[in-house]
Image: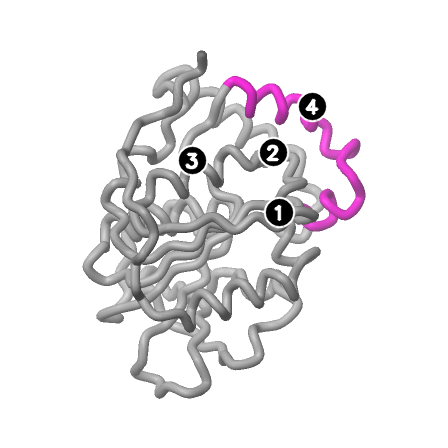
Amino acid sequence: MPSLRPLLRHFSAVPATFRTLQLPVGIDGCSLYAVTPLSVGLTQEKLLCLPSTFGSVAREFRLHLENFSLLGCSYGANVSAVLAAKHSERVTRLVLVNGNAFVSDEDLEDMEEYKDVNLWPKEMRETAEAKCGADNLQDKWTEMVEALRQVEREDGGDLYCGHLPYIKCKTLVVSGGQDKFVPLSHGEYLSERIMHSRLSVVPEGGNDLVLSEAERFNTLLETFLQEPDDKLTQSREFVAVPSKV
């Protein structure tokens, strides 16, 4: 498997006070990009950026770092959350952008409105084509929606709700106020059920907010990474998938 496409390529720029590193994951020569403050040495803690194409490789995650932070967008956010739960003793910070721990009937209805990728807004389609390829986008989108339908039928829509109580690190959840694919309610759900978390909403941001609102997002990211690990946010009770009533 070739090196994974780094999530950082989707950003307009890395935050000014950080530098990028490339780290081996230990799986078939794969690698992840990381960012780390300019003020610390190469042995200091890294922020790993999981691309949405990280996929099933996460099941065999073997990274030779004692402590690290995770950042992921969309599916990469979902993988990051699971990794943070499974490796809670190693993950010190977590950033989830447009992630969703479950899929509801309403989500599937919204996706049905966008079943033909040719009808997507131009910028949204071009962003998706850059990830999946113009020739493959329709097939991949149809396949993903069907997979989510199966999860809704067989598992009540639960993707990884049961992992959320095991995330112990300080967490930033970021949602786009204009996201057509992942409504704000998903960010609220994650923030309410991850113990040391807070939700930041980018009002004008869509599913591609790391691009369209790059300056705002990078400011959020840089501020969060440099904050003390005080974990002052309120702990919550944990529930499974919210009621559909």
Residue type at the position of mark 2 = Trp
Q: CA distance from mark 1 to mark 4?
A: 20 Å
| Earlier sequence position, callout 1 versus callout 3 | 1
Disc 3 packing (10 Å; few <14; some 14–19; many ≥20): many
The residue indicated by pointer 2 is 141
Q: Element under label 2? A: helix
Q: Element under label 1? A: helix
| Earlier sequence position, callout 1 versus callout 4 | 4
Residue type at the position of mark 1 = Cys
Query: Which is closer to the viewer, label 4 or label 2?
Result: 4
Residue nearest the observer in this picture, 146 or 243:
243
Q: CA distance from mark 1 to mark 3?
A: 28 Å
Identify the magenta region. 105-129
Tags 2 and 1 touching, CB below 8 Å: yes
| Earlier sequence position, callout 4 versus callout 2 | 4
Residue at the image position 61 percent from the left and 57 percent from the top: 210
The residue indicated by pointer 1 is 132
Residue nearest the observer in this picture, 67 or 4:
67
Q: CA distance from mark 4 to mark 2?
A: 12 Å
| Earlier sequence position, callout 2 versus callout 1 | 1
The residue indicated by pointer 3 is 189
